[in-house]
Image (tube, rainbow, N blue to C red):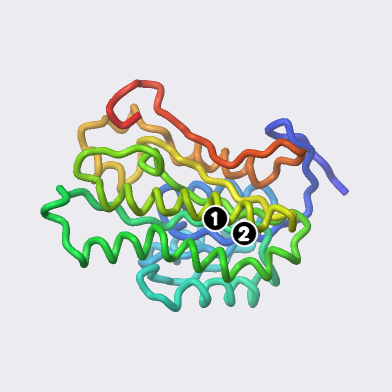
């Protein structure tokens, strides 16, 4: 079996199977590209069918890639996604809960509908995706769940109360889930980046120049590192800051 060394980790060329939500653009798209080029076959999700189909076509040049159009506001989406992964991939080695929704407004201008939407996408969907994936992950030789959080998973910024609450909830979920499944050999990690050069960040922080932001590809490389690493050391969360110190950091 062919073997190679990357990121300081001894890897085999056996193809693994990953589910990545929100992978038709931004961080999820970069994660998918990097995993596809490193022996992963994929099921990716996206809300826009046309954009998703384009991503599947491009990624299929490097791997077996399937797409499923899914809206994380739909309570049936998590189970539908995992069932589809079992059908087309035959199992799951890695779940990347990346799909997210941004929102910025003062507390007094925020509504119940705003709260419900952001919490559903950023906290409820990862919870039930992780829950649905566990039976398949238990069958994997190297099962991993990676949650894409944010610096606001541990910090708070003006006009980001609902968004921050949702990402704090994701952090809490990750910590508890990691403890619950550690004895089964399932690793659960949380990545908490600062400003990343995506459409969401441009909306949330238009004052930060795009060339000062973390690139989606950097997040993808960290996902690969976490998914492929071995050893006894525990990495429960990773914070990623921009080189320039600014209010986001």
Q: CA distance from mark 1 to mark 2?
A: 8 Å
Check the image and name the residue furthest to the left.
Answer: 109
**Crowd around label 2: few <14 · some 14–19 · many ≥20 (10 Å):** many
Residue drawn where x is 44% and y is 78% of the image: 76
Q: Which residue is mark 2?
A: 18
Q: Position of residue 153 (x, y in %)?
A: 40, 44
When asked about the image quadrant of residue 91, the answer is bottom right
Q: Nearer the viewer, residue 92 or 14?
A: 92
Q: Quadrant of the C terminus?
A: top left
- Which residue is at the front of the view, 139 or 49? 139
Question: Is residue 4 toward the left or the right of residue 176 in the image?
Answer: right
Q: Is residue 23 visible?
A: yes
Residue 84: x and y in percent read 58, 75
> Picture quarter containing residue 88?
bottom right
Looking at the rendered structure, the secondary structure element under dot 1 is strand
The earlier-in-sequence mark between 1 and 2 is 2
- With 221 as the anchor, is 135 left or right in this view? right
Q: Which residue in the structure is indicated by mark 1? A: 96
């Amino acid at each position: 079996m062919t073997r190679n060394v990357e990121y300081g980790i001894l890897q085999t060329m056996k193809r693994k199977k990953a589910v990545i939500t929100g992978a038709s653009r931004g961080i999820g798209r970069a994660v998918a590209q990097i995993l596809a080029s490193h022996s992963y076959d994929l099921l990716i999700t996206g809300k826009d069918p046309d954009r998703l189909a384009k991503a599947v076509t491009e990624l299929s040049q490097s791997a077996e890639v399937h797409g499923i159009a899914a809206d994380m506001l739909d309570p049936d989406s998590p189970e539908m996604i995992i069932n589809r992964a079992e059908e087309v991939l035959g199992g799951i080695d890695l779940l990347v809960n990346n799909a997210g929704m941004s929102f910025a407004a003062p507390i007094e201008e925020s509504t119940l509908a705003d709260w419900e939407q952001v919490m559903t996408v950023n906290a409820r969907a990862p919870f039930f995706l992780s829950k649905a994936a566990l039976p398949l992950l238990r069958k994997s030789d190297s099962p991993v769940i990676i949650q894409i959080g944010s610096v606001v998973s541990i910090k708070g910024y003006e006009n980001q109360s609902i968004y921050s609450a949702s990402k704090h909830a994701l952090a809490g979920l990750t910590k508890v889930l990691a403890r619950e499944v550690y004895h089964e050999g399932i690793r659960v990690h949380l990545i908490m980046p600062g400003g990343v050069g995506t459409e969401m960040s441009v909306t949330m922080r238009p004052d930060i120049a795009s060339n000062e932001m973390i690139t989606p590809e950097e997040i993808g490389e960290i996902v690969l590192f976490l998914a492929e690493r071995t050893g006894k050391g525990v990495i429960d969360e990773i914070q990623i800051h921009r080189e320039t110190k600014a209010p986001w950091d």
